[in-house]
Image: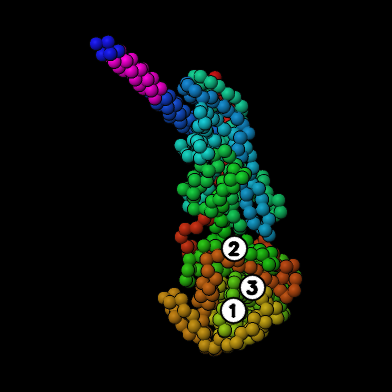
Amino acid sequence: MTNRAQSSNIGFILLLALTITGAGVIVAVGSSALGDVQEQTSLTRAEHSMTLLDARVATVGLGENSVQTVRLGRADSGDYTVESETGWLRIDHQNYTANENETIYNASLGSITYQTAGTEIAYQGGGVWRHQDGGTSMVSPPEFHYRGTTLTLPVLRIRSNDAATGDATARIRRDGEMVRIFPNEAESYDVTGEPYVNPIRDGTASVTVHSRYYKGWADYFRARTTGNVSVDDGNRTATVVLETADIAGPFEFPEKGGEVPVRRVQSGHSLTDFETSVKKDSGTFNNIYVSFYAERGDTAYEAGVEVPSGIGNSYCQDGEPGSAELTMDVYYYDNGTSEGVHRWSNDSIPSDSGDVQLDCTEDDDTVIRIDFTGTEQNLTYGGSNVTEETAIDWDALNDSATTKPDPTTFAHIGDDGEDTTYTYGDEQNVRILTRHYFAMFGEDFDLRVFHGPGDRGTTQIDTTGSGGTLRYDRASGGAYITYLHVTENNVSVELN
């Protein structure tokens, strides 16, 4: 009887101990879960508040209102911080001329953060970011808009410092007027002295962001642009590179050896318009040679016009041209084949009319006009170089060939009546020749200018009064940019 009573008491004590232990575990687990729920709720609330803050900062920074107020809500276990010097954004125009780089913009971004238990919700650069466990995700996108070939980038900068805990309210004020960065005719490139104007040409335009949230910026660049995106973990930067779309339309006549960039050319006979007018400066056009040429990989091309001797200041009288005969040559060589140089020529072109001519201005200046896509001027295939001076040494290229290009075949099937075989003595118009040889250079190349003989062309050509037009069908896709619109918009944020 005594043993049974003792067993009953021991069982009761064990049951009581298990009940107390279980209750403790339930309380501990429940408290932890409740804490996690409360922390997640606080982060979610902070994300909503920061997203609202993002919209209000944009409203103030972009000039719609001068002052806005946002209640951020109670920070149960975290703190709000405003900092002016966290992160920076830089815009570079690389290789814009002669391999020169220009930093168009470089300034700090600043940030507004809510931080708790190793997680940050941050506003920076017009976007909201969540940073946790070394990674960053985007809550709302930054002010970075890339559409087609246009980048619109209103840089929103935080220009104040503050901090708050508890039930915080943010008061947002505009800090000065909007500053136009690009285009901006008051600013100019270091080397060329040319103003910051659109369309932006040559090289590449890149945007680099240094930030604690650089991985989120990189993800955004990859998702919203067709540019080349890279990250530098050591420097905590994300960079997107956009190639300039370059020339497609009117162009200024470059200095001797300068280039007219040709980019994103559709395959086949995609060239639609190519013409130029070259105006005389000092002296005469007597015995001058003017050409456009290209070299890319194994291929080379040159098309030029030679003015004969005897063309003096009296060629143009009362706006009317005189009479002379011009020479036009088109050369092409492909080192990837055994064929020698293709040469098309005509040394008896009347100078007073047609696709290749000497025209007169109202003040009796002489202008060389060449329509490389005109159909009225024929050239004859065959022969060797007879022009005194060209940009490319065609005789040297021809010496390295093993087969005379007679016959040769133009084989862009379906374009301008090709597939066509030519033998020496055959004729073809300049348009067919230009479109065919342009198509041999692929999607991207530089078309350069040359004048001679010697340096005479440089002093006898008025480059500011000369120019041309180049149009072609463009290939789809690619990371190209034509128009850049950048402004700086400063705001200050006070926490109460």
- Whether residue 346 appears in this view of the structure is no
**N-terminal label among 1 and 2:** 2
Above or below, 450 relative to 343: above
Residue depicted at 55% across the width and 30% down the height:
112
From the image, state whether disc 1 or disc 3 is nearer to you. Answer: 1
**Residue that numbered label 3 is attached to:** 291
Q: Earlier in the sequence, mark 1 or mark 3?
A: 3
Q: In the rendered structure, find residue 261 and report the number of the disc placed on it.
A: 2
Q: Main secondary structure of the magenta part?
A: helix
Q: Which mark is residue 103?
A: none
Q: Coloring scheme of the render? A: rainbow
Residue toward you, 190 or 87: 87
Range drawn in magenta: 7-29
Residue 383 appears in the rendering: yes
The residues bearing labels 1 and 3 have C-alpha atoms spaced at a distance of 21 Å
Amino acid type at image mark 3: Ser
Residue appearing at x 73%, y 68% in the figure: 458
The quadrant of the image that shows the N terminus is top left
Q: Position of residue 22 (x, y in %)?
A: 35, 21
Mark linked to residue 335 = 1
Q: Is residue 201 left or right of residue 191?
A: left
Q: Position of residue 14 (x, y in %)?
A: 33, 18
For residue 175, side relative to residue 313 (left or right): left
Nearest the viewer among 53 and 294 is 53
Horizontal and vertical percent position of residue 305: 63, 76
